[in-house]
Image (cartoon, coloured by chain):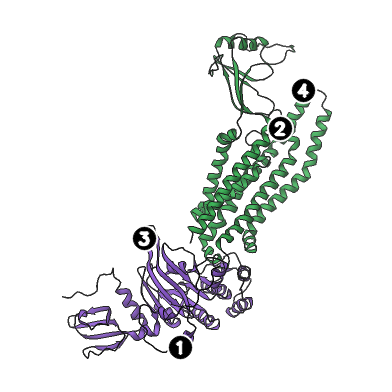
Amino acid sequence: MIWLTLRQFRLQGAVVFAGLAVLGAALLITGPGLADEYAAGTASCATDNACEEFARQFVIKHQALYGALLAIVVGLPGLVGVFWGAPLIAREIEAGTHRLAWNQSVTRTRWLAVKVGLVGLASMAAAGIAVFAVDRWSDPLAAAAAPRSSRIMPLLFDAHGIAPVGYAAFAFALGVTVGVLVRRTLPAMAITLAVFAAVQVAVPLWVRPHLIPPERGAVAITSGNLDSLMLHNDSLTVRTQAGAGTWTLENHTVDASGRKVEKLPASIGAGPCAPPGPRPGSDAPPGPAQECFDAFAQQGYKQYVVYHPADRFWPLQWAETGLFAVLTLGLTGFCFYWTRRRIS
Amino acid sequence: MTADRPAISCSAGVRFLPRLKAGVSARRARCTTALQAEGLGKRYGKRWALSDCTLDLPAGRVIGLVGPNGAGKTTLLNLAVGQLTPTAGGIRVLGGRPASGPEQLAKVGYVAQDTPTYAGLTVAEHLKLGARLNPGWDDALARDRIERLGLDPARKAGKLSGGQRAQLALTLGIAKRPRLLVLDEPVAALDPLARREFLQGLMEAAVEHSLSVVLSSHLVMDLERTCDYLVVLVESRVRVAGDVDDLLAAHHRLTGPRRDPATLPAGQEVVSESHTDRQSTLIVRTDGPIHDPAWTVGQVGLEDLVLAYMASSPSRPSLEAIR
């Protein structure tokens, strides 16, 4: 059974793993150069500002390539679900070959277990290899970008850590399940892609924030935590930063009684927080004057933030991987039930 | 898993017909039951594909399963190999529950409808597949058969002709060395020559390895040459089952002056009837001889016999009308 499974999987497996081998080789060759460039740059910058500027330029320079690599890691689970999972059983049923396979001296449970087990492991291995290689390669970039974007934020989160392995397992199981239900290869592939994409959108939006209860609280608005202050017509909106590399879920101003404030009074916007005129030669720090923050404090305005701090990355990774593992097991169990009971 | 049950006498096999011949051929001497169904039924939604099927098929025979399209032949065979699970009743094949475990699977070979093979695998890889998945695989037999058929082992199954593909599927079925080989319309898609070669190969294997064979077809002609036992399935019910010779001996075509079939003596069962103004033609089943001098008694061929049963199916309007 193992031989047959590997024989049937040969082509699809070879394509993906060959691609990964090429990717891995390329990253292995270019990785040290990238790390050296970053190390040299950070060593040679004299002031904090210069260092920040170097990091910014460094990220911008490699952004396109980094984005492409992240896209590969994010896309691979979907690819695996569509091209490995969906056809696994659907193609057999479509061609009627399941009736050939099931009448050898192997029970269909074993038949399915070997197929799902081997190709499922291959799916997880493929995702693991991709995420490991890209993670390693992009370490300097992640370090350079750290203050502005961190791995805990959506999209970056999806392409780092161990979650991609969970996604791949889930996508594969989803593909197999859809294939078992739909029984035709092409529709199964299309449905798998659609459902998996929907899950990948829905989870960061609605599920991941609540896997672990986020931190929440109202903080004073200070020059230290101000992220942006925007004056548009008469309305003033304020956003603060909860901390370096946090994943902010909610960020709005509340009044003294804790109610959400849609519009800050124009008096503040026009008064203490009015944008300063051009100050040629001034070496005052950019941003509003201290009176602005005093005005917020006086009138009882605070900023309400809900966020996951940066050190939640691994707990969230484990929680999300666990969630996908449970989904994967559920789908796989369903496949076994359905294959034993409902397919002929 | 399930141990073989003690052999059951196959005199029960001819449940729809009393035994007519005392002589039991040498082949029938090792009679056990190949397939035993009791009130077997399979329902899809509201439609019964097979209902209330009670059968006792003897082992060591080549059994033809015949009936019109949609009669439930495939359903019955799929139930026999465990591809399907019954909705009602029970079925035992060679003493075990179909597909209940590797041992049961090893005992029963199945050549499914349209003789599926893996299009992307070569002939040699199909043999390897058989060898890997069947503990009782007879590799010499498989190779020998492929060679005699003139199949190129390096050729992909998807590039074979329909007849060659069927032969490959049959080779897989035979080389597995099952005790019972089930074939579902294996020749339906083949041209007459390929059909004959296929059935010939099947017969040779059946004799050589003393296989029990159950073979379905909607054409009696295919079965006439190969089968010594016949089951007629019409509209999801078994209409008649029995030894071919017994069936032929027990059925007669009676031609004579027009007459109400109800006036026939007891023990003569009318299978089909047709009437003209002056003449009646009946096909009857009986144990005893026909004494009535008014009848001209004729032989019934297998095809006519099967057609008679198909035509007389209960839901079909009676052909005659007594005017």
Question: Which image quadrant: the N terminus of chain B?
Answer: bottom right
Q: Amino acid at mark 2?
A: Ile
Residue B240 image position (x, y, % from top left):
36, 76
| Residue A156 seen anywhere in this rendered image of the structure | no
Give me the C-alpha separation between circle 2 and circle 1.
91 Å
Residue of label 3: B47
Residue of label 2: A60
Give me the C-alpha separation between circle 3 and circle 4.
79 Å
Residue of label 4: A49
For marks 2 and 3, give the one nearer the viewer.
Answer: 3
Give me the C-alpha separation between circle 4 and circle 2.
16 Å
Secondary structure of the residue carrying numbered label 1: loop
Position above or below: A279 against B315:
above
Residue of label 1: B25
Q: Chain of mark 2?
A: A
Q: Chain of mark 4?
A: A
